[in-house]
Amino acid sequence: MLIASIVGARPNFVKLAPVSRAIREFHDEIIIHTGQHYDYQMDRLFFDELKIPEPDYHLNVGSGSHGWQTGEMLGGIEGILLKERPDIVVVYGDTNSTLAGALAAVKLHQRVLHVEAGLRSYDMRMPEEVNRVSVDHISDLLSCPTRTAVSNLAREGITEGVHLTGDVMMDILLECLSIAQERSDIIDRLGLEEKGYYLATVHRAENTDDSRRLGSIIEALSEIGEELIFPCHPRTEKMLRKSGLWQGLDERIRIIPPVGYLEMLVLEAGAAKVLTDSGGVQKEAYMLQVPCITLRDTTEWVETIEDGWNVLVGASKNAILDAARNFEPTGEQRQVFGEGDAGRRIAALTLSDNDK
Ligand code: UD1
Ligand code: UDP
């Protein structure tokens, strides 16, 4: 079979790595890169570190409004899918690249496999929620990371083609953690002590594009009174500069450029606590058994909350400070993200789809 994987943004690359490896054991694969992310640290670094094969096609779409960006991708992807005629198109997560890939494929009557299907925040103001809901409803094969994801789909009437595979981010974390810890000197380089610092990431539109929310988060991070490492997404840097917050940043917030996946794992594993609005980072904190404080009002990863390892604080300064000082995990983890064999299970789905 010929499988086409469509990616474009940082979290897509992390999910592609284990799936692509598993798929290539059985099939030919082409990788289509939309160009949604393009800075070295948001893009190339992940292909190099995770040994992801070179994309066969690169659309170089770049940044823009949602409609424009998705439209550009849609046209570009359609041309490639018409030429290549893959048996299955695989899309990953919930970015605009995911939506464009699924939409282009379904309109050509090509089969769509959605990796990380069934996640819901039930907040349609999030661009990612619009993307997830739309993609799930036009996919033929749905790879769910958790049982909650399977039930979410069932509630929307999606039961056919749904498979509980576990989470591909568990696969890549298990594969890379010890290698990352052996190879990376980031803890020493930044002069940190294991469990002697906090780690923060912020990039979600609801936090960056609202200067009151962003200001409140930054104030809270400054007042925690612990050393805090902040690998900064380019979107966040842009908004911090635009709102004037960049100039007044407290010296206890150590902003660094985005880091690669391996260094990120090392920073996460070594942190006393993680503060984030990232979906992937919430999961990784849970997998690494690091307490997580989530700078959002909702989360798709409800199991991390139910197990007592994650707490939702939104952008309220007091709630962030309270959690930073007092939140401690309360429960045993159920290890809800699978065994680290999700990539293999997804490849098996493609094999059993052969006669469709
Ligand atoms: C996208 C995804 C989001 C995901 C995030 C991961 C959508 C709707 N959102 O959000 O789900 O969590 O990626 O990181 O797809 N920029 C650069 N260099 C880059 C990439 C982006 O400077 O390499 C800047 C540009 O100013 C751009 C802004 O970041 O306008 C936002 O980029 P975009 O890809 O539109 O959305 P993200 O916020 O990255
Ligand atoms: N990540 C990284 N470097 C960073 C920040 C994040 O490697 O500086 C990784 C993170 O560990 C996770 C993935 O990027 O594997 C998550 O992507 P992101 O937070 O950009 O998006 P989300 O998961 O929120 O969609």
Image (cartoon, rainbow, N blue to C red):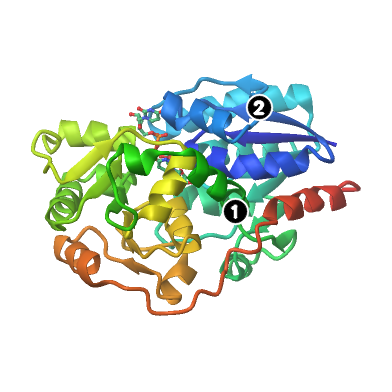
Question: Circle 1 is placed at which residue position?
Answer: 174
Of 114 and 167, nearer the camera is 167
* Image side of residue 356 versus residue 62, left or right: right
Specify the quarter for ligand 2. top left
Q: Residue furthest right?
A: 355
Q: Quadrant of residue 282?
A: bottom left
Q: Can the viewer see residue 189?
A: yes
* Image side of residue 230 versus residue 28, left or right: left
Label 1 neighbour load within 10 Å: few <14, some 14-19, many 20+? some
Question: Circle 2 is placed at which residue position?
Answer: 78
* Image side of residue 229 versus residue 154, left or right: left
* Image side of residue 22 versus residue 242, left or right: right
Q: Is residue 18 above or below residue 302?
A: above
Q: Quadrant of residue 19?
A: top right
Residue flagged by tag 2: what amino acid is it? Glu
Q: Is residue 141 above or below residue 100?
A: below
Q: Quadrant of residue 67?
A: top left
Q: Is residue 294 above or below residue 247?
A: below
What x and y, as percent, mark residue 56? 68, 22
Report whether the residue tagged 1 is closer than 8 Å to ligand 2. Answer: no
What x and y, as percent, mark residue 349? 79, 53
Q: Quadrant of the N terminus?
A: top right
Of 139 and 215, nearer the camera is 215
Residue drawn where x is 66% and y is 63% of the image: 339
Element class at badge 1: helix
Residue flagged by tag 1: what amino acid is it? Leu
Of 308 and 3, nearer the camera is 308
Label 2 neighbour load within 10 Å: few <14, some 14-19, many 20+? some
Q: CA distance from mark 1 to mark 2?
A: 35 Å
Element class at badge 2: helix
